[in-house]
């Protein structure tokens, strides 16, 4: 299933029975937290209660997290591919070679922000079809 098809199918099951400012961003953010907590619960049961890690449940919660990301991405007019590329560009700025603790601790957030903003400009340029450069 392609990412845009996933977003379309996920949105067909989205509730719109509430009226708040930024309601879809709020719904997505709250859902991401609660689904992440369900993922942590699976790890808690495995780590502290002597159970095997329930991989089916871990995958279920990962899928639920994707559902809420689909709602968020739709609301802020982006998609999985764009954001996957954006985070990789940011991480390349943070860790030019590979992960290391010094770069993780001593982050240049201003430089990372520039990368994020430049990436966004490139995406907008692609969408406008007026600019043909990368
Ligand atoms: Mg869940």
Image (tube, rainbow, N blue to C red):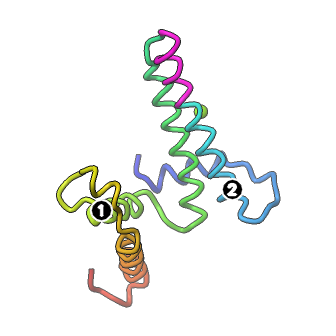
Residue of label 1: 94
Measured from the top left, where is residue 121 in percent x and y? 40, 81
The first of marks 1 and 2 along the sequence is 2
SS assignment for the magenta stretch, majority? helix
Residue sitting nearer the eye, 54 or 90: 90
Report the residue at 35% width, 68% height from top. 108
Instruction: Find ligand 1 in the image and state its quadrant.
Output: top right
Asked whether 13 falls inside the magenta stretch, the response is no
Measured from the top left, where is residue 38 in percent x and y? 58, 31
Q: Which residues make up the magenta segment?
A: 40-50
Report the residue at 50% width, 15% height from top. 48
Measured from the top left, where is residue 74 in percent x and y? 57, 61
Residue of label 2: 26
How packed mark 2 is, by other alpha carbons closer than 10 Å (few <14, some 14-19, many 20 or more), is: few
Measured from the top left, where is residue 56 in percent x and y? 46, 23
Left or right: residue 29 versus residue 86 is right
Helix, strand or loop under label 2: helix
Mark 1 to mark 2 CA distance (whole Å)? 29 Å
Farthest top residue? 50
Report the residue at 30% width, 65% height from top. 89
Residue sitting nearer the eye, 76 or 6: 76
Helix, strand or loop under label 1: helix
How packed mark 1 is, by other alpha carbons closer than 10 Å (few <14, some 14-19, many 20 or more), is: many
Q: Quadrant of the C terminus?
A: bottom left
Residue sitting nearer the eye, 48 or 105: 105
Report the residue at 43% width, 53% height from top. 3
Note whether 46 is above or below 81 in the view shown. above
Q: Nearer the viewer, mark 1 or mark 2?
A: 1
Farthest left residue? 97
Dots 1, 2 in contact, CB < 8 A: no
Residue 21's disc number = none
């Amino acid at each position: 299933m392609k990412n845009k098809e996933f977003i379309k199918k996920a949105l067909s099951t989205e509730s719109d029975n509430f009226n708040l400012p930024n309601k879809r961003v709020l719904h997505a953010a709250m859902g991401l937290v609660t689904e992440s907590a369900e993922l942590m619960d699976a790890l808690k049961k495995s780590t502290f209660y002597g159970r095997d890690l329930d991989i089916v449940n871990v995958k279920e919660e990962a899928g639920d997290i994707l559902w809420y990301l689909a709602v968020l991405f739709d609301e802020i007019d982006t998609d999985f591919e764009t954001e996957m590329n954006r985070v990789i560009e940011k991480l390349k700025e943070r860790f030019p070679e590979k992960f290391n603790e010094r770069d993780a601790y001593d982050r240049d957030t201003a430089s990372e922000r520039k990368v994020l903003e430049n990436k966004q400009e490139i995406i907008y340029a692609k969408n406008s079809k007026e600019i043909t450069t990368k």
